[in-house]
Image (cartoon, rainbow, N blue to C red):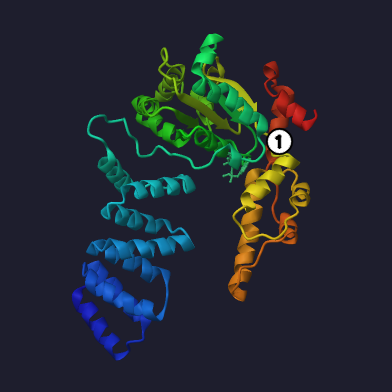
Amino acid sequence: MDRTTIEALELALEASPDNLLLRKQVAQGYFSLGDFDKAKEHLNVVLQQESNKESKALLAQCYLKLGNNSPGIIICEELLAEDIDRDLLPTYLQLLINDGQIDEAITQYQSYQLKFPDWRDDQIESQLKISTKPVQEETAYNPFLEKPDIDFSKVGGMENVKEEIRIKIIQPLVNPDLFKAFGKKAGGGILMYGPPGCGKTYLSRATAGEIDSKFLSIGIEEIMDMWLGGSEKNLHEKFEVARKNNPCVLFFDEIDALGSKRNDLKQSAGRNVINQLLKEMDGIDSQNEGLLILGATNSPWHMDSAFLRPGRFDRIIFVPPPDEEAREQILKLQLADKPIKEIDYKKIAVKTSDFSGADIKMLIDLVVEDKLRVSMKTGKVETITTKDLLGTCKKVRPSTKEWFNTARNYALYSNVSGIYDDIKKYLKL
Ligand SMILES: Nc1ncnc2c1ncn2[C@@H]1O[C@H](COP(=O)(O)OP(=O)(O)OP(=O)(O)O)[C@@H](O)[C@H]1O
Ligand SMILES: [Mg+2]
């Protein structure tokens, strides 16, 4: 749109000032011309008459362009609280950065990345890195290290996994002398496997919270990228970041994808990255002290056995779906901050067999949505009842069964050295 067209539209607008559609067009036109003051003026008129997301988002962009950060941030926060529009994220984060709220921007960026693992914004990312990079040492501080705010008390059930983690990796860290006295060497990691949604990732983050340490998650896509780029160096840098920020929980998610690919990629750069990873895990001398290595997978049968040697993932733990008692705990934890009325947790726990923790979360999300809808009609906060939860249970399909169909075969036919005995026991085979 050129200026003449916009001016013509504005004339038309004078004739019918209530034509919001037209006014939005004019605002958009001025925005694209770079006249943000004019755009803002029209958007404000629109918003006085009608609240709509698009105009608010455009207004936030105007404020960004005009260097008026605070009102822009307020609008973005209001919009993002309603629902998270990914297109708005760069505007919001840029406003935070321009406003000097670097730490907040980093926290927000991380949380969006956790919510949308495939989302990223190079421009924002590089700004955050540059602006927070200390001068002395390049890898001393990495803004993408997370400091989880959950600990074991926020994780329902999983008692034996928690116990393993305590004994195998937390205790050596807090009582190094004791372990040395018994000639035990710290090091090595724990690999968790099991059906999806049963708390592997969640518990890993809680492990960092439990000992008040940092948390660095290395996703498979990231390592794949390193693969393609033939840049094993990046992997080394990740480990270095963790080492310099110790104690640190280093978490490898979906690590099976790595193992299974090693054979396919024997000749290519892929192998180098795997070998690099193995080398980093082995560490030289006490290089990896203070590093807690956890891994998670849904398909342990696809793991490269090289990962399972001593000093690497030398403990493999089955993470089953939560039992009745654990489900009761998870229900309590997840309903703790919701408006509830005398919930019969036991009853719901009974009705949710085969549910994963994530399924329970889904159940609660559904009930909350329903209640919100009713509350908006009645204008008061409607409380969640046992009946609501029981009624909605039927709408959620437990997601763990499918996994066991596959697992059963491996447990029966590829149970080399009893590695899947836990699955057999669970399935009563
Ligand atoms: N034991 C639990 N206690 C409390 N919440 C849980 C528990 N298990 C799962 N949840 C909830 O379910 C969500 C999904 O769990 P999580 O991502 O840890 O599963 P996962 O085992 O890593 O699954 P996947 O194999 O698909 O990666 C968590 O973010 C948490 O909200
Ligand atoms: Mg996970």
Which residue is at the front of the view, 397 or 174? 174
Q: Which residue is mark 1?
A: 404
Which residue corresponds to the image point at 26% horizontal and 35% vertical from the top-left? 134
Q: Quadrant of the N terminus?
A: bottom left
Q: Is residue 187 left or right of residue 76?
A: right
Tell me if residue 382 comes above or below residue 24 in the rendering.
above
Q: Quadrant of the C terminus?
A: top right
Which residue is at the front of the view, 357 or 103? 103
The location of residue 306, given as percent across then percent down, is 53, 17
> Disc 1 beta carbon < 8 A from ligand 1?
no
Which residue corresponds to the image point at 80% horizontal and 30% vertical from the top-left? 428
Tell me if residue 252 comes above or below residue 102 in the rendering.
above
Which residue corresponds to the image point at 26% horizontal and 29% vertical from the top-left? 137
Tell me if residue 344 comes above or below residue 145 in the rendering.
below
Task: Determine the residue located farthest toward the right in the rendered image.
Answer: 428
The location of residue 62, given as percent across then percent down, is 28, 66
The location of residue 179, given as percent across then percent down, is 54, 14
Give the amino acid type for the residue marked by disc 1 in the picture.
Phe
Which residue is at the front of the view, 32 or 219? 219
- Residue 402: image quadrant is top right
Specify the quarter for ligand 1: top right
- Tell me if I can see residue 395 in this picture: yes
SS assignment at label 1: helix
Task: Determine the residue located farthest toward the bottom in the rendered image.
Answer: 15
Which residue is at the front of the view, 93 or 3? 93
> Crowding at label 1, few (<14), some or many (≥20) Cα neighbours within 10 Å?
some
The location of residue 280, given as percent across then percent down, is 42, 20
- Tell me if I can see residue 303 in this picture: no
